Image (spheres, rainbow, N blue to C red):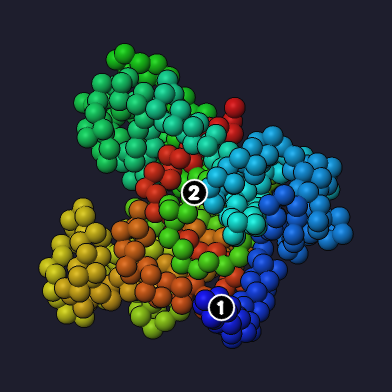
Amino acid sequence: MNETVIEPILHETKTRAAVQPLVADIQNFAQDVFDTVREPLLVLDAALRVRSANSAFYQTFHVSAAETESRQIYELGNGQWGVTALRTLLEDIVPESTVFNDFELEHDFPHIGRRVMLLNARKLHDELVLLAMEDVTEKRRAQHLLEQIEAYAQDVVDTVREPLLILDSSLRVHSANGAFYQTFHVSAEETENQLIYELGNGQWDIPDLRTLLEDIVPTSSVFNDFELEHDFPHIGRRVMLLNDLEAMAWSIPVLREAEVHVLQEGVAMRGGNIALIAAGTGMGQALLHWVDDRFVPSPSEAGHADFAARTEREITLVRDLTARCGRADVEHVVSGRGFLNLHRVAHREPCRAGIDLDAPDAPALISAAALERRCPGCVETLDMFVDAYGAEAGNLALRTVSTGGLFVGGGIAPKILPAMTTGTFMRAFLAKPPLDAMVAKMPVKIILNAQAGLLGAAVFAAGQR
Ligand SMILES: [Zn+2]
């Protein structure tokens, strides 16, 4: 009988001795993890006294170990953790269950001011509770702002009483709002992608508007307060936003992660300039300055600046463009139309995809043939396009010192994403010695949201109130 009692004890002792170093290792490892985690952590015992805190806790709350250890959590600081809701959680919920997640504590903390902390608790074993806190103040603030802007964007887009049209540079309708459809009794199918003059039964084919759109808009990127006086059936005054690029620029500060494709993570410098390059029907570039706590875009006519050739094949291209067009500007190369110019010089033999360069969708046909590798000349065309796009984006980055990030907008990039992400674009972007180290630090992102222009128009409108 004695044996049966003694034996298990001996056995247990032996086992304990054998695992002792392992336990010590695990404890050391746990302590290291505990100390190096960037979120403040507290280990509480069953009486909710602080068993230990990590350095992030001491740093965040500007307190010492002496002020913290062995104290009851509610006594810490000036009782800042004594909030009723947190009491309930720690005293009622934790004893019952082993975790609680994402409890939001908003509080005026001594030294650090009003903060929003996200608290998560884990019961380590029956005796100890690990309390982790994440400072989400900035995140909440940004989220709140974004929600406000989004709510406003929705408001502008859906319920603004004035008809709103966004046109691309070929004067086709990029998008319209609900008020537009209601006012003019037309559907989205009848409106989107239509030339403005073709809308309705040609009711927008007005001489004054034609002059404005065809003569004034192409030479200046923005016009404001243009009021169209015209006898429309049913309607009066309208608001028109015509510069898609500027509208798109306004959207950049509120774009979400899922709305961009990251080509280079980089490090965005706070208050650093942001640059936008956008190849679509034409080529647009804009610069965003940080003014009075927000980004304000400045338009440019950089699409009509000279195209800078860097390679033999680009020199051939410049020769061809100069002979045919008088000069080679960036838009001759990096735009929908650019595909046609590149297609000419990239084919040494007839196009195997049989593309008709006069077809209205020729640029899309060329990039499709290239992505499907149906014609070596079309593959070369797309490669030249992406290469030149990256180089011009790099030029813009240098000209604007866009340490806040460079964004690639416009309709083309999302459509040829597989070609934009092969490395050709970024190689050309980065090849800017002696300043290659500077451009290597800039975030570079492709805007995927096709409605970025509309979103930006809403942001702009929100700021005008
Ligand atoms: Zn081809």
**Sequence-first tag of 2 and 1:** 1
Amino acid on which the number 2 mark rests in the picture: Leu
- Indicate the position of residue 342 as horizontal and vertical percent values: 30, 70
- Indicate the position of residue 220 as horizontal and vertical percent values: 50, 44
429 sits left or right of 410 in the view: right
The structure residue drawn at horizontal position 43% and vertical position 45%, both measured from the top left corner, is: 452
**Of 391 and 359, the residue lying toward us:** 391
- Indicate the position of residue 90 as horizontal and vertical percent values: 64, 44
- Indicate the position of residue 97 as horizontal and vertical percent values: 53, 47
Q: Are marks 2 and 1 in contact (CB under 8 Å)?
A: no
The structure residue drawn at horizontal position 57% and vertical position 67%, both measured from the top left corner, is: 266
Kindly tell me whether residue 136 is visible in this rendering.
no
Q: Which residue is mark 2?
A: 255
Quarter occupied by the C terminus:
top right
- Dot 2: what SS? loop
The structure residue drawn at horizontal position 64% and vertical position 37%, both measured from the top left corner, is: 88
Write down the quadrant of residue 344 in the picture.
Answer: bottom left
Q: Which residue is mark 1?
A: 2
